[in-house]
Image: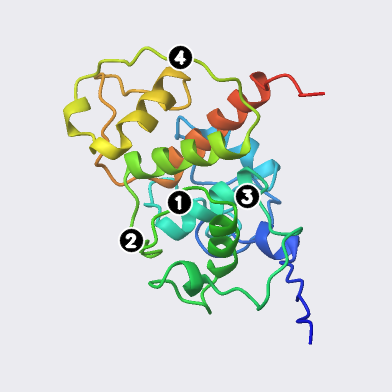
Amino acid sequence: MTSKFKLVTLAATAVLTLSIAGQSFAATTTFTDIANVSAKDKIISLQDKGLVQGVSKERYFPDATLTAAQGIQLIVNALDLNIDTLRFLKEPHATDYFPKADDAAWYANALIIAANNDIGLPNDLDPNLTWTKEEFTHQLILAIEKHSNLPMIKIIPMEFNDQDELTVSYEGSVQRALVLKIAELDQAGNFNPTDEITRADAAVLIYNALAYIDEHQAPSAE
């Protein structure tokens, strides 16, 4: 007897309404806690597009750190990743791909989408661990290169003060992010790779990445 394939779809609205903090609040007002944040305009721009949301209606918490789950949700939203055209023999679960995940958690759908779009996440991913700046940058660059029609370019690596602190496996991604101006150094010329990344820093990277994608689309094959 022929097995029937079960088409499993994830409601786009369910994905888009999840904030990078795991809660959903409509983008109806400008956040009251970003007035003095240098990334204010970029955060507002992403909020207007429904790509970032607050921890409450009025608060963004720009200095709060970002967990792996929140970072993955942000990347999935920003790149508009989905599994709408995939068919599964059985309903997929986050733990099918990441054993440390929780199938009942708010982030489960995002992990399923990320895994099926092959954005380079490790199987031993712990969704609840806080990501560092180099980890988020690395995963964002891998996802962009996998799912954006960007021209291939040869880069000349940058030198910066704390590059010896980079994890070797992340070095290439961070270098590409810096050269493409998706990431930037601080005023002292440091990248601060091992610092826990904040919600504001993540928003800046996402904004810069989307701006780069818009400006550098490779010619269509047609």
Q: Nearer the viewer, mark 4 or mark 1?
A: 4
Q: Amino acid at mark 3?
A: Asn
Write down the residue under mark 4.
154
The percent coordinates of residue 73 (x first, y second) are 55, 55
Which residue extends farthest left?
164
Task: In this rendered view, identify the residue nearer to me: 53 or 173.
Answer: 173
Marks 3,4: beta carbons within 8 A: no
Q: CA distance from mark 1 to mark 3?
A: 19 Å
Q: CA distance from mark 2 to mark 3?
A: 20 Å
Task: In this rendered view, identify the residue nearer to me: 45 or 97.
Answer: 97
Image disc number at residue 77: 3
- Closer to the chain start, of discs 4 and 1, is 1
Q: Is residue 215 above or below residue 42?
A: above
Q: Secondary structure at mark 4?
A: loop
- Closer to the chain start, of discs 2 and 1, is 1
The structure residue drawn at horizontal position 45% and vertical position 34%, both measured from the top left corner, is: 36
